[in-house]
Image (cartoon, rainbow, N blue to C red):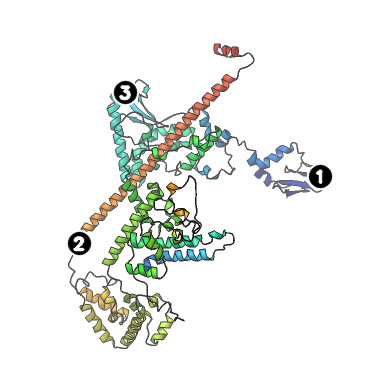
Amino acid sequence: MPAIRHASKRKAPPAGFSDIEDDLLIFSNKMKDAENAPTTSVPRHQVHWPIFQISHQRSRYVYELYYEKEAISKELYEWLLKNGYADKMLIAKWKKTGYEKLCCLRCVQTKETNFNSTCICRVPKAQMKEDQAVECVSCGCRGCASSD
Amino acid sequence: MLKSTHKTTALPEGWTEHKAPTGHLYYYNSSTKQSTYTRPVAAPLPAAPTPPPPNNPSQSFLQYQSVDSQPSAGTAFNNFLPAGQSHGRGGFQSNRGRGGHDRSRDSRPQPTDKPISRHAIPDNESWFLIHTKLGRRFVYNAAKDQSFWRIPDKLKDGILALDQQRTREKAEALAAPKEPEAPQGAAERPVIEPTQAQPRDAEAEDSSEYEEVEVTDDEEDDENPSKRQRTEDDAPDEPVEFNEDDIAYQLAAMGQEYGLDPGEYGDENMDGWEEGDAGLEMTEEDSAALFKDLLNDFGINPYSPWEKLVEEGKLVDDLRYTALTSMKARKEVWEEWSKEKIKTLRELRAKAEKKDPRIPYLTFLQKYATPKLYWPEFKRKYKKESEMRDSTMSDKDREKFYREHINRLKLPQSTLKSDLSTLLKAQPLSQLNNTTLPSHLPSAVLADIRYVSLDSGIRDELVEGYISTLPPPLDTNDEEETEEKAKERQDRQRRQKALEDRERHVAEEKRRQKRNLEFGKGRLREEEAEIARAMNVSKKGLKDHLMEDET
């Protein structure tokens, strides 16, 4: 069993963490609420949607801070990834063309679907029929194609 | 009213007052077993207390529900509000001074117009320019007692001059909005005052709505009601503006009367209004800058996500929020702003000398450390303090400083003093000079153990004495910076003004639309009346009409 480390003995987060600490705390509180919310009245496939959405939002927040606003240092960014504040694999997808707005990794996983295709939310709005509102099954995404 | 006077008289003997389940009061005579809604009065013969005959039960009942028995039909209702009546008209009633447009006027075919202000036209004696309540204007020749809607060519120069003067006045008033209103009022009042009496008497409430001061474009002199603008300063007793809700209410009410669909009347095409016709120009940059000002003013954290900002909804109430029209544009501007802000923050931080974590810790030590406590005891006792929990300083350092400090406390005063003076002497002149405030000593001094080990009273005296002996600093001036700031402030004011102008323009546009609507409505009514008259053909048929024409 690994030794339990006390908070005061732990290494301090890199400089700049105090700037974003509050917002990250808000995200983690939201996540806790979503985790503890009762699921009795929710359809079975929708139970995990809020979790996916908050995780996406938080990852996006960290991603934008580092890549777009350049507000945090590389050390801090890596520290955040290491400590689970953002999804490293999802951010890796966002850097690729065509995946800039990807909602979750499950939606590009073709092997788990019936027709070996990506999720409906990956289809651009322009190619959809009129008035066809979709919410994808895995994360409740309403469309995350780059052209939308 | 009746009720209250009744209350004052005492009930005659045998009568008791009760409350019905419906809330009405009624009276019961236990001896005669009679009950009545009307309050019995003591009969002149107390021996035989006959209850007053309920001559008209329904009438007596009505007196207790006077609120509901008021004629609540449209026209009468608006003008006739009984004094004590607090009928549920919502917030609309409070705006009535301006917004409560009495409908009796609507029933007329056209709203009556009245002159509200008169200006002598320079260089043309006996000619006057008259402004009317509905924002039109005409010229009046006092000598010949003639008036013309169309302005004669010979007067155009004079009116142009007049307008220019008024615009100038207006611009001045706008340029100094912060100044007390007295001088401005003094400048404009005398012009308006003499004619104000006319509209006042008729509709004392509504008159203030029309005390307007207009700004006109210098170029065109043809009638154009859109040029009239209202200043809020002129209605100090009526701070309630005629706002959108009121207009919406009016439109809805009128639309209902005519059985129109909501789409048919209230099409206020916001985009149709050209911006800043009368006022300053509002460019894209300006609106973006306005939104940025808003973000700055609310102290928004540039690191926070956009969703948080939207959820909190603090900004929505501000006028500047409307400078940008779409959420997408707002988000873009916010992104730009946060990027800039973060950049400046980083620069500032890089420039500012690093706040030494030792300084607060040392002052903390000076306050609480005593030779009576060992380090572990001290640490346990104060573990909740922020200085003891600061993550930027390691526990080892804290312990080291504590031990050192305790050791120094045991030293004689003279050594401590000499140590402090050597420390002060070691500071360069740029850091420590005779302009340095004792409360803002350089961090190199504050973060030294020698500074805190002396008792603060003695220490401060020593430091002040030393500072007063020092030469002045090498002077550097920051005039450029202040100039830059002044320019920034000016820019900001200009943008604010542009936004206000635009708002006023929009309000003006709305008012004009409303007025047009009223005209149209009046005409419609007239036509309806005509049709009704035409339809009213009696048995005699067309002959009836012909007879009427002849008579």
Residue A89 percent location from the top left of the image = 40, 64
The residue labelled by disc 1 is B47
Amino acid type at circle 3 is: Pro
Residue B346 percent location from the top left of the image = 30, 64
The residue labelled by disc 3 is B152
From what the image shows, is residue B101 above or below residue A93?
above
Q: Mark 1–mark 2 contact, CB under 8 Å?
A: no
Foreground residue among B248 and B497: B248
Amino acid type at circle 1 is: Ala
Marks 1 and 2 sit apart, C-alpha to C-alpha, by 104 Å
Question: Are the residues under marks 3 and 2 on the same chain?
Answer: yes
Task: Estimate how packed mark 1 is, as few (under 14), some (14 to 19) or many (20 or more) residues with alpha carbons within 10 Å.
Answer: few
Foreground residue among B90 and A138: A138
From what the image shows, is residue B311 above or below residue B378?
above
Foreground residue among B337 and A133: A133
Marks 3 and 1 sit apart, C-alpha to C-alpha, by 89 Å
The residue labelled by disc 2 is B477
